[in-house]
Image (cartoon, grey):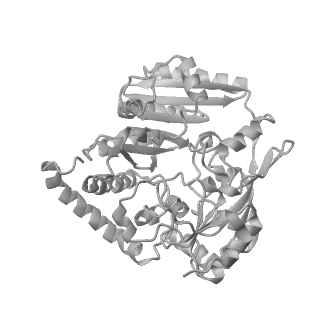
Amino acid sequence: MIQFKMLSDLLGDRFTTDIFERQFYAGDLAPLPKIFSLFFKSTPDAITRPINTKEVSEIMKFAYSNRIPVTPRAAGSSGIYSCVPTMGGIVIDIKSLDYKIEIDKNANKVVVHAGVVWKDLEHELNKKGLSLMAYPSSAPSSTVGGWLSSPGCGIGTLKYGRVYGQVLSIEVVLPNGEIMKVSKDEERFNWFLGSDGTTGIITEVELMIRKIPEALSAHLLKIDDQETLCKVLQDVAKLKPFYLSYSDQIYTKMLKEAGKESHTDSKYMTFVVFDGSKKEVTESVNKLENIVTNNSVKEAPRQIAMDEWEDNLHFYPMRIKRAGPTLLAGDILIPLKNISVAIEKLKKLGIEFGIEGTVPLHDYTVLMPMYLTDERKFLEFVFSLRHVKSMNDIAISVGGMPYGVGMWNLPFASRIIDTKEKRRIKKQLDPKNIMNPDKHTHAVSLMPRIILNPLIFSAAMLAAGIVAIPMKIAGIIKN
């Protein structure tokens, strides 16, 4: 029995072991079959809500000295189990680190607590005529620290680059409780960004910002064939718009079933947003018009596009889960030039999926194939999970990779990151391996280590595909 009196005395009512509250931290956006609870302990033993870096440090000192696993968590807005415990222990909820926003208008920078939500930060900056350079598609709930612990691609990164490049410095608490401030010029700066909270907890961030752009222009393009979509996206990406996304007709249908209206009836839709000076935006729009003309593409009325942007319809692509009962999605990063090849391979999986994707980098796209299932039907749901693995395999086959590691993509970790270097850093900073174990580099606890071993995982998914064939014929499962 773990004794938490020290943490209770430190945090008061911001510490709890109440089972009702703890259960809220046992998952993220991805649904999980209940049988998986037999394999690891996803419900934490305690929840802590620190309000400053010193409290985070004290929690980590306590956990480190007692070898208690610690899982940092923000909004839990990913679906790869990067912020879910596997061995119980302590969850540190960084959302409570949310009250510091110090804006330096003259230097175009802001110092902000890691628990501040991106949309709230943007709102505060806008009051002073300033704006972020980039933010995630989950900006209404995602926190600064949470996104910096992820791969860091999102809205604005096509124009300004990954968010890591906009970070000037970070304050981080190491697994042993040491507080460290690291600037972007130091080699160890990259030890913490995109690390899924496995090397330390980011508590404060110094971030570059910009003036609110002078002009903005939004565009909805209607495209009727796959090859044209691929070409148009490559051409438009070269213009470096602030935002570039695309979706297909099935995704539009899912949106309508989820109660969201869409203004396109074409096979594919592309959403483009330019911002900057009036001259810069005008030049970009003129170039876009040439692309539209040269590819025989239709454009929806621009007021509709502007309305969609102002209504924040670019946030939360997985909002179609309301059409459920259960939504599953792949999340893959692939070369932009290979979209058409990837879509053709996805079609051969034999399931109806909707496509939504963004172009956050000049020559890469994040593609999300989404499909509906029913987690209430055990066999239907469990067998449908094999398709996510197939989507990751397709990404690799076209020169891409899964987008992010967390726990569920551990079998693909060597394709995503330099696992040898990550393990070296992890061993140096966290020799007791208490910091978000089973994530990012290798599984620690027994069952995840067995299940997520690349060879065993691949064999299990292959077997599931073979067994699924007669089950589909017999009508036991749909996909």
Give the residue displayed 75% in from the left and 43% down from the top. Answer: 209
Q: Position of residue 155 (x, y in %)?
A: 59, 40
Kindly indicate the quadrant of the structure image that contains residue 54.
bottom right
Q: In the picture shown, does residue 141 fall above or below 438? A: above
Query: Along the horizontal axis of the image, is 61 left or right of 270?
Result: right
Give the residue displayed 58% in from the left and 35% down from the top. Answer: 243
Q: In this orientation, which residue lies closer to the viewer: 38 or 265?
A: 38
Q: Position of residue 31 (x, y in %)?
A: 41, 54
Query: Along the horizontal axis of the image, is 445 left or right of 156?
Result: left
Q: In the picture shown, does residue 143 fall above or below 421? A: above
Q: Can I make out residue 182 in this image?
A: yes
Q: In this orientation, which residue lies closer to the viewer: 471 or 333?
A: 471
Give the residue displayed 61% in from the left and 77% down from the top. Answer: 430
Give the residue displayed 68% in from the left and 72% down from the top. Answer: 8
As drawn, the residue found furthest toward the right would be 106
Q: Position of residue 280 (x, y in %)?
A: 69, 27
Query: Along the horizontal axis of the image, is 12 left or right of 285?
Result: right
Q: In this orientation, which residue lies closer to the viewer: 19 or 214?
A: 19
Count of marks, rendered view? 0
> Which of the image's four quarters has the N terminus?
bottom right
Query: Along the horizontal axis of the image, is 124 left or right of 468?
Result: right
Q: Position of residue 432 (x, y in %)?
A: 58, 81
Q: Can I make out residue 82 in this image?
A: no
